[in-house]
Image (tube, rainbow, N blue to C red):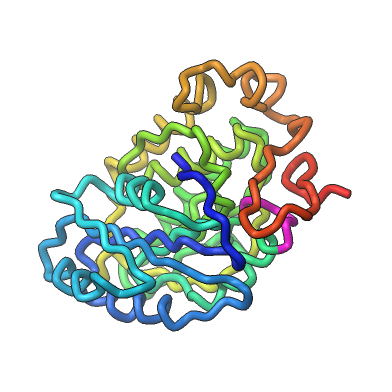
Amino acid sequence: MARPAEQRERPLLSVVMPVYNERASFATTIEAVLRKQIAGIDKEIIIVESASTDGTREAVRQYEGHPEVKVVLQDRPRGKGNAVREGFEHARGDFVLIQDADQEYDVEDYDALLRPLQRYQRPFVLGSRHVSGWKIRQFNDQRGLVELCNLGHRIFLGLLNVIYRQDLKDPFTMYKVFWRDCLYDLHFECNRFDFDFELVIKLLRKGYRPLELPVTYRARSFRDGKKVSMVRDPLTWLRALAKYRFGSIYRSDRRHASTTDQFSSPAAIGALPASTPQPRSTIGTDRPRLAAGGRLGR
């Protein structure tokens, strides 16, 4: 999954942006990301456009040839998860950040999310929308539907925490930020929003425990273009929760399971890994090591 690391003087951030039918918000989002300056970090933006029907593809193609942008055009829509996976394949950075084009999140949160990675404190960070209370989504129209969404979040959050013995607040956030090396040898297959579950679960099973940091979040309604299916997608989430609890998570079949898969047995699910897999730095060799649970070792 991860490309060979390149040697560079400054760390590079790969911003993976899946785009499908976001004509109203794409231009504002991409310009905000392009303007965003992060101290000590360069960036590349990988836009994966999934054959939109509303004119978004034409807007995306205007950025072909931009020095900070790589445009990937899919021949048909296969789902957000599929687009993110394809973006991973093109990522060259030391760090990876997932950025939707719907303006629900604020790019000014990049600095705080990247700081633990920059300082080698944690290899995996989640931008949590769950700062206070349990109502993550709040918008004025479709009140009944938004309450159902918030309740669903709590149910699926509870299931993930129980099954994988975690205490996470918002693993389904868009802002997932990590060292690209964390993806090494992982096998991914989900194409829709179940990829949020698959990615977090497989990073957990590989031994990376995320640090959750609060982010700014403005929920958009289904009338504004939200694409989650209230019937189809919850079924795929249940499947992901059950399927990825056991079995190999690696491309190279199961040969790593006995040594690398920290959660290969029920008894191991609740335990910290003996050692956290070490991201490989491309910006110098003298750095602290990450101890169990992704914390900074001495």
Residue 177 located left or right of residue 286: left
Residue 261, image x and y in percent? 62, 25
Query: Residue shown at 46%/19% (left/top)?
Result: 253
Residue 288, image x and y in percent? 80, 52
Viewer-proximal residue among 200 and 283: 283
Name the image quarter holding residue 219. bottom left
Please identify the residue farthest to the right as the structure is shown.
Answer: 298
Residue 86 located left or right of residue 275: left
Query: Residue shown at 20%/64% (left/top)?
Result: 21
Viewer-proximal residue among 185 and 137: 185
Relative to residue 280, is residue 268 depicted above or below?
above
Query: Residue shown at 36%/41% (left/top)?
Result: 234
Residue 147, image x and y in percent? 42, 59
Name the image quarter holding residue 61. bottom left
Residue 205 located left or right of residue 146: right
Read off the magenta span: 119-124
Viewer-proximal residue among 184 and 225: 184
Query: Residue shown at 59%/30% (left/top)?
Result: 163
Relative to residue 10, is residue 271 depicted above or below?
above
Residue 294, image x and y in percent? 72, 46
Magenta stretch: helix, strand or loop mostly: loop
Viewer-proximal residue among 16 and 212: 16
